[in-house]
Image (tube, rainbow, N blue to C red):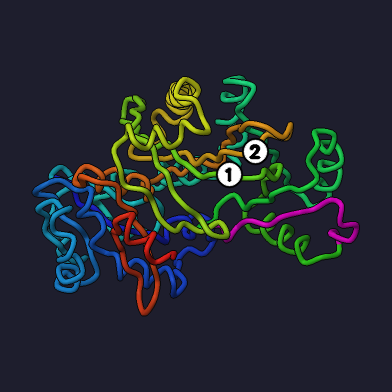
């Protein structure tokens, strides 16, 4: 039996240096409004930890056809379980969720810190990307780590020969595009803008930033996996999703064959197979004994600098469950293509639309 929990503040917790972290208001609202979400990927008999069990029942009622037969429980009920009785299945593992589960936690403090380090974009740049460099000439995976502001200008000057003049600077830990800034080296006074202050503050707080070329993105997609305690990495499926200003908007729900057909307009099935196989090998070698559970790799289809065709670029590793995993769970229970979106009006809500409904709204 598992106890599942949705903790969407996970990425923010990873980047915080405060011991007793209080998530921002938006993150708390998202967690409360979608507290029932694990019922969509849980199995019959599992428990879902929520803030308010009765409220979770009401929130989840319209999704009953997609849900497992689970019991919603609250934090004070955790004392009734023994570590050998349950497995903890958190959205993402961090010190905040470890405090919630206490002795039920599957990892100790040292292991939790190791997971935090492996969740960093610095880890992805230094440990994962080098093993992906020679998959194919059409696959891009360029990223640099700098630990001082003084390193930025020389770095940009040295790599400008590759034809890029716009760069993306990322904090090691951040969520939903908030830890991302853009640098245009054709702007002579960029060193005097507030971006340098932001970079300096991130380096002070998190130790470094990563710097990547800016690509002309055509399409987002993700590859979803799990890794077990023995380091065996299993590919779970393809995630076709949408972002606006770096923030997640929604996923396509469909069969793997149909999603693959949609993506194959940009990426060949053969190349995608090579990427998946190499990711399985590299991630297994780097994360065996460090982490087990779901993870995803975000990627982009980008326009070819030569002016024709497409290339594929690695974006980042999400060492946690993703909305892509949720979409895969939901897709098992649909008979025609749909779109899953998280929308905010008076509160955060999960919507599952038929394609025709969205097309009608767009007219």
- Residue 303, labelled with which disc? 2
State how far apart marks 1 and 2 are (Cα).
6 Å
Viewed as shown, does residue 117 lie left or right of 210?
Answer: left
Viewed as shown, does residue 56 lie left or right of 124?
Answer: left
Closest to the observer, 173 or 243: 243
Residue 97: image x %, image y %?
A: 34, 57
Closest to the observer, 173 or 26: 26
Closest to the observer, 97 or 169: 169
Q: Image point 41% across, 46% down: which residue? A: 112
Q: Image point 21% across, 47% down: which residue? A: 334
Viewed as shown, does residue 191 lie left or right of 31?
Answer: right
For marks 1 and 2, the one nearer the N-term is 1
Circle 2 Cα neighbour tier, 10 Å, few/some/many (<14 / 14–19 / ≥20): some
Residue 220: image x %, image y %?
A: 51, 45
Assess whether mark 2 and mark 1 are in contact (beta carbons under 8 angstroms).
yes
> Label 2's element?
strand
Circle 1 Cα neighbour tier, 10 Å, few/some/many (<14 / 14–19 / ≥20): few
Task: Kindly identify which residue carries mark 1.
Answer: 218
Q: Which residues are magenta?
A: 177-191
């Amino acid at each position: 039996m598992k106890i599942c929990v949705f903790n969407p503040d996970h990425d923010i917790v990873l980047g915080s240096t405060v011991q007793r972290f209080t998530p921002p208001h938006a993150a708390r609202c998202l967690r409360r409004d979608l507290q029932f979400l694990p019922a969509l990927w849980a199995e019959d008999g599992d428990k879902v930890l929520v803030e308010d069990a009765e409220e979770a029942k009401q929130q989840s009622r319209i999704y009953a056809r997609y849900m497992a037969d689970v019991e919603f429980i609250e934090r004070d009920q955790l004392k009734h379980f023994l570590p050998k009785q349950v497995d903890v299945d958190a959205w993402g593992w961090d010190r905040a969720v470890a405090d919630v589960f206490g002795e039920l936690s599957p990892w100790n403090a040292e292991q939790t810190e190791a997971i935090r380090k492996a969740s960093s974009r610095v880890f992805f740049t230094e440990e994962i990307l080098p093993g992906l460099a020679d998959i194919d000439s059409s696959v891009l995976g360029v990223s640099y780590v700098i630990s001082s502001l003084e390193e930025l200008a020389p770095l940009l000057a040295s790599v400008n020969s590759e034809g890029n003049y716009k760069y993306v600077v990322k904090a090691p830990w951040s969520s939903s595009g908030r830890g991302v800034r853009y640098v245009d080296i054709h702007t002579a006074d960029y060193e005097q803008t507030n971006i340098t202050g932001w970079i300096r503050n991130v380096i002070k707080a998190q130790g470094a930033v990563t710097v990547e070329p800016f690509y002309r993105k055509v399409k987002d997609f993700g590859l979803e996996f799990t890794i077990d305690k023995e380091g065996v990495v299993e590919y779970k499926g393809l995630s076709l999703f949408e972002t606006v200003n770096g923030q997640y908007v929604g996923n396509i729900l469909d069969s793997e064959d149909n999603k693959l057909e949609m993506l194959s307009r940009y990426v060949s099935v053969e190349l995608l197979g090579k990427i998946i196989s190499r990711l399985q090998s590299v991630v297994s070698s780097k994360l065996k004994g460090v982490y087990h559970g779901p993870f995803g790799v975000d990627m982009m289809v980008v326009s070819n600098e030569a002016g024709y065709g497409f290339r594929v670029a690695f974006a980042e590793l999400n060492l946690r469950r993703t909305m892509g995993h949720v979409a895969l769970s939901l897709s098992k229970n649909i008979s025609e293509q749909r779109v899953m979106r998280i929308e905010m009006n008076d509160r955060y809500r999960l919507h599952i639309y038929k394609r025709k409904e969205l097309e009608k709204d767009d007219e």
